Amino acid sequence: MSVPVMSPVLIKADRAGFMLIPDRDASFEAIVAFLEERMEQSRDFFANTEMVLDLRNRPMRSDEVSELCRKLYEKSRVRVVEVRLSEELSLSMAGEPKKSRLPAETIRKCRDEVPVIVKNTCRSGVRIVSTSDCVVLGDVNPGAEIIAEGDVIIFGTLRGVAHAGAAGDQGARIYALSFEPNQIRIADMVAVPPRGSKPAPGRFEVALIANGVIQVVTI
């Protein structure tokens, strides 16, 4: 009796588009080869569609995600619009894939010039890396870390670590509804704000470099 061969990638379709679910045991090379063949065979069917890449069971490095997105776009103009990393964390993506400049790490970022948008509160142990800006739609809790080559924008309270201008841009800024961080960094400068409770500002606070030091002001 023959044993059925598992596909390296399950492609599911619904009214919103397609979802790519890589098999947990498949190699990255097998995943890419399978998708290239499917896109070639069904070029017109998949052309100009949007897809969600589900990595909850089969993690990928950031360089692998970038390469996969690039190949899908080159083959059939397929756009990966979301990457699901866990039950609580997904990244919304837009624009054409481009090659990443940062070292390969567990995927916590997306492509150059496309901001990473995190639609959840970042809990302890979460590390987000972006080659451009990073937007967090929630709090950044103690033990969480946000690193961006551009600005960091937090629609909530910053209690963890935020690093803007990670590639050396001293003009980068960190925005948050409230600053209570463990540490903030802009380019190669580091600051640890004073501890203690403070009244909520009611508007965004921003950390920036002025007069050679990191300052936090209300805007």
Image (cartoon, rainbow, N blue to C red):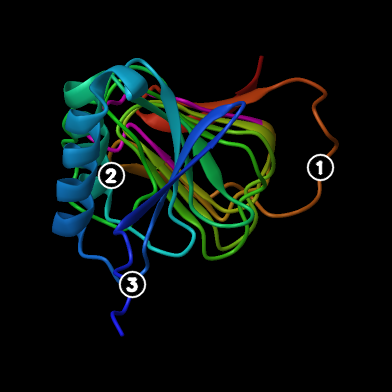
Q: Is mark 2 on a helix, strand or loop?
A: helix
Task: Name the residue rendered at 32%, 31% in the picture.
Answer: 165
Q: Can residue 171 be spotted in the picture? A: no
Mark 1: few/some/many CA within 10 Å (<14, 14-19, 20+): few
- Residue 57 is tagged as none
Q: Where 119 falls versus 151 (above or below)?
A: below
What segment carries the magenta color?
Answer: 163-176
Kind of residue indicated by mark 1: Lys
Q: Which of 140 and 76 is in front in this view?
A: 76
- Residue 199 placed where, x, y %? 85, 37
Q: Which of marks 1 and 2 is nearer the N terminus?
A: 2
Question: Quadrant location of the C terminus?
Answer: top right
Q: Which disc is residue 65 wearing?
A: 2
Residue 38 rendering spot, x and y as whole percentages: 24, 38
User: Disc 3 designates what residue?
Assistant: 4
Q: Is residue 55 left or right of residue 188?
A: right
Instruction: Between residue 202 and residue 91, name the one nearer to us.
Output: 91
Residue kind at label 2, given as amino acid type: Val
Q: Do the residues labelled 3 and 2 touch (CB within 8 Å)?
A: no
Neighbours of disc 2 within 10 Å: few (<14), some (14-19), many (20+): many
- Amino acid type, callout 3: Pro
Residue 179 lies left or right of residue 59; in this view the side is: right
Of mark 3 and mark 2, the one earlier in the sequence is 3
- Label 1: element kind: loop
Mark 3 or 2, which is nearer the eye? 3
**Secondary structure that dominates the magenta span:** loop
Assign the N terminus to one quadrant of the image: bottom left
Which one is in front, 59 or 179? 59
